[in-house]
Image (spheres, grey):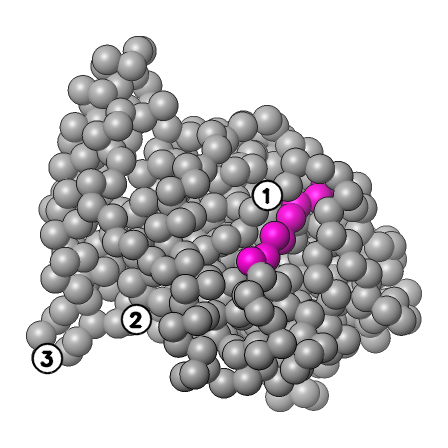
Amino acid sequence: MMNSKLEPTKRKRIKTDEEYSDEHSEHKPLCKYGEKCYQKNSYHLQKFKHPHRDPVVKPELELQVKEKSDESITCLMSSGSTGMKEQETPAESTPSSVTAEHGIDYQESKGDDNELAHSPLDVKENIKQKFLVEMPDDFYQFWSFCQSICQQNTLGKLEIIELVGPFELLDKTQKESKPKDKSDNLLTQWRFYYDPPEFQTVMVGDLSKGYHIGYFRDAPNEMPAFVGSNTESEGCVLTPMSDNLFSAVSQMLSVTVKKVDPFKKSQLMSLKKQLEDWANKNGILIEPQNQILKKRKNLMVAKTFYECGIVVPVDKRTNVGYRQIPETSANIKKICKKIVESQNLAEQNKNSDALQELVTYVQYANDESDYGMGLELGLDLLAFGGEVFHPTILHLLGVAYELLERKEFFVMLKTHLNNRRRLATAETGN
């Protein structure tokens, strides 16, 4: 356990769901589903008025074990895997004070028969409810493309990549006349060890290395900033690939054809042409990766250990919104390494002093509305890895996400840290 010095020294009390709902209900819009509303999550209850609910019921969104994905999905771009091979890295439980402090209630259940509220019949709303973010148009367009080529049996034996996460839910929703009440813990399925809340996996490749592709977004209520990839066994770096899945998969195929035998190479080239023809026909741009990298570099205020950067609102006139951490990235990594490699608690406490000093600087920055510093340091600790940092990560990012109005990310973070593990079969250091 990390030295108590790394615990927050200054906390801001956030009202409970009931207090917030009672005090601000007259200013909230009515829920469009009325008495048929299926929602039970606190974010929805705080945002919309529910006159028929008295008192406001707190949600208990609960966790389950992941099921094997449907064959109709794996026939599209299957990696041939039957699930994720996990290496146990039990995370310490999250203090209840953190949940109360930030006004978020997403409780993890210990039982097996977990139930959620009824899923909405609208596919997009169903995905948004389960994953707390909205999928962009290219997500549904890519699904249509995959269905078309699956019918032609062009991908059955290529074994390139598997569609997971929101794609699995989309597939199940389309097959069932009535969505089931029970649900897996979708917030942690296919969430790899280094993945920040900003990254949502939608495809996996070689699981021995932990290769995966997903959407990265700077705020949960925004569409993705880019489609990126990460290889868990190689570390935390998230690489921007494109602004849509078609372009990202096209890039991946271009790299893959250089590594396969001539017979499979011709198949992959045929698939690449099909994908690009379908994209062009539907007005989807296949953009070079360097253009995406250039756009991202112009937007980000700090690089972070993930190297894909963060974006926060900054006042152009006053420059309020972000200030640099008063330490180099190299030295922060050295500080983290010393803490992780401490031989005993006394040594760990001593080595933690330098990090605690940075946490104090973040508190000063937050007081002066420079919220980006806490976001940067919190993500750096998450990217470095180590259970010893979890309490500090929860504090730094919990406050940052609240101040930046990105509370859904804190729900994802808390759930992830309660069940953080490495999914690749081969581990490497930072």
* Principal secondary structure, stretch drawn in magenta: loop
**Distance between the Cα atoms at labels 2 and 3?**
17 Å
Asked whether 290 falls inside the magenta stretch, the response is no
Dot 2 or dot 3: first in sequence order is 2
In the picture, residue 368 is in which quadrant?
bottom left
The residue under label 3 is: 317
* Mark toward the start of the polypeptide (3 vs 1): 1
Mark 2 residue type = Leu
Q: Residue under label 1, please give it.
A: 108
Q: Is residue 274 visible?
A: no
Labels 3 & 1 near each other (Cβ < 8 A): no
Q: What stretch is highlighted in magenta?
A: 58-65
Q: Tag count in the figure? A: 3
Residue that appears at 35% across and 50% down? 101
| CA neighbours of label 2 inside 10 A, class few (<14), some (14 to 19), many (20+) | few
Q: Residue at 20%, 34% (x, y): give it.
A: 355
Counting from the top left corner in percent of width and height, residue 293 is at 39, 66
Q: Which mark is residue 425?
A: none
Give 12 or 164, whichever is nearer the viewer: 12
- Residue 96 placement, left or right of 58: left
Q: In the rendered view, tell whether residue 397 sits above or below residue 26.
A: above
Of the pair 74 and 36, the residue shown nearer to us = 36
Which structural element holds mark 2? helix
Q: In which quarter of the image is the C terminus?
A: top left
Query: The disc labelled 1 sits on which kind of residue?
Result: Glu
